[in-house]
Structure formats: structure tokens, C-alpha cells
Image (tube, rainbow, N blue to C red):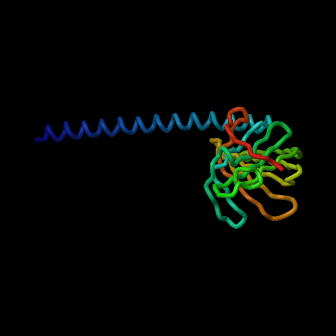
């Protein structure tokens, strides 16, 4: 009976160790993939060719909604930027997609990094339909980012949260701009 219990205990220990090794391998692979995504996002910020595909929009008073990343984004291609929001509502909105699309020229780009590895990207965007300060935070170790859009002429600030990816890898759908 003692021999049976010893063998059973050894078998259970072996199964547990194998399960832990598999989990550690998965975690290690995820960390490596996140590091690659983060590096690509950093390069995109430095080149000013990126898209923040938002999956969540947070309004001025803290209310938030989950949205489609292909139609809710901030894109920057060198010195030209686009900010688009699009909500699943019955009305088509000014952009034809249930939201607003505004575009303009970019200026005053500033990039800083803190001790923990979080990168901050600040820019002004000025166009016919927008004049705003955009502050983007790229979190350390991944391509997760948030962007706060603060209009210059009112206090209707919004925050977009999602993934920051290179402009060439995005699959965004742009609506009509004004």
C-alpha cells in the first residue's frame, strides 16, 4: 500500500511540474511577443507613422463604451493626423459611420520616457474640424496605449484606449471628414 501511495504521489508531482512548465512557456512566449509589439510601437511613434486602434472610448465624466477598433482611431502619417470616433448608433453621423472624422496638420511633437519605461507622446493637431492637444501614453512592455484628446475651444475631452501599431499594419476604415 505504501508503494502504491508513493508511486501515485510521484506521478501527480510529475504531472504538476509538466503543467507548470507548459504555463511558464506560454507566459514566456507572451512576454516575447509583447516586447516585439512594444518595440514596433516605439519605432512607429518615433517615425510619426502609427495608428492607435481604440477598443474603448472614455468620455469627460468617466463614462465609457467599448467600440470597434477599425472605425475608432487616431492615425498619424508623418505630419498629417486623423481622429475618428464611430459608435453603433442608428444615425449615420457626419462621417457616414455614426460618428465624427476630423483631420489636420500635426505640430509640436514631444516624446518623453519615464524611469519605468512608459513613453509619452504629445502633439497638436489643427485642421478645419479640429484644434486639439493629443497626449498618448504607451505603456511599458506592450503596445497598449491611451490617448487623451483635449480640444482647444471647449472642454469635451475624450480618451481612447487600445493598441498602438505601425501605420502600415493597420486595417482602419476612414469615414468622411469635414
Front residue of this view, candidates 73 and 43: 73
- Name the spot of residue 154 as percent of width and height, x first: 84, 64
Front residue of this view, candidates 155 and 99: 99
Looking at the image, how many numbered discs can be counted on the residues? 0
- Name the spot of residue 12 as percent of width and height, x first: 26, 40
Front residue of this view, candidates 63 and 114: 63
Residue at 58 percent across and 34 percent down: it is: 33
- Name the spot of residue 177 as percent of width and height, x first: 81, 48
The answer to whether 49 is drawn above or below residue 136 in the figure is: above
Quadrant hosting residue 49: top right
Residue at 76 percent across and 53 percent down: it is: 100
Image quadrant in which the N terminus is located: top left
- In the displayed orientation, state which residue is furthest to the bottom: 61
- Name the spot of residue 171 as percent of width and height, x first: 67, 37
Front residue of this view, candidates 23 and 6: 23
Residue at 66 percent across and 44 percent down: it is: 70
Amino acid at each position: 500500500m505504501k508503494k502504491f501511495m508513493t508511486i501515485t504521489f510521484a506521478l501527480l508531482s510529475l504531472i504538476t511540474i509538466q503543467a507548470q512548465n507548459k504555463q511558464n512557456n506560454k507566459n514566456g512566449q507572451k512576454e516575447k511577443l509583447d516586447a516585439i509589439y512594444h518595440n514596433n510601437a516605439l519605432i512607429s511613434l518615433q517615425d510619426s507613422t502609427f495608428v492607435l486602434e481604440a477598443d474603448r472610448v472614455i468620455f469627460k465624466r468617466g463614462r465609457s463604451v467599448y467600440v470597434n477598433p477599425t472605425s475608432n482611431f487616431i492615425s498619424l502619417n508623418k505630419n498629417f493626423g486623423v481622429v475618428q470616433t464611430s459608435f453603433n448608433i442608428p444615425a449615420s453621423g457626419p462621417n457616414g459611420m455614426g460618428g465624427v472624422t476630423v483631420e489636420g496638420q500635426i505640430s509640436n511633437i514631444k516624446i518623453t520616457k519615464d524611469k519605468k519605461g512608459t513613453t509619452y507622446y504629445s502633439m497638436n493637431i489643427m485642421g478645419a474640424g479640429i484644434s486639439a492637444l493629443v497626449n498618448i501614453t504607451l505603456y511599458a512592455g506592450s503596445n497598449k496605449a491611451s490617448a487623451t484628446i483635449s480640444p482647444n475651444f471647449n472642454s469635451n475631452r475624450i480618451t481612447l484606449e487600445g493598441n498602438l501599431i505601425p501605420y502600415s499594419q493597420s486595417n482602419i476604415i476612414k469615414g468622411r471628414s469635414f
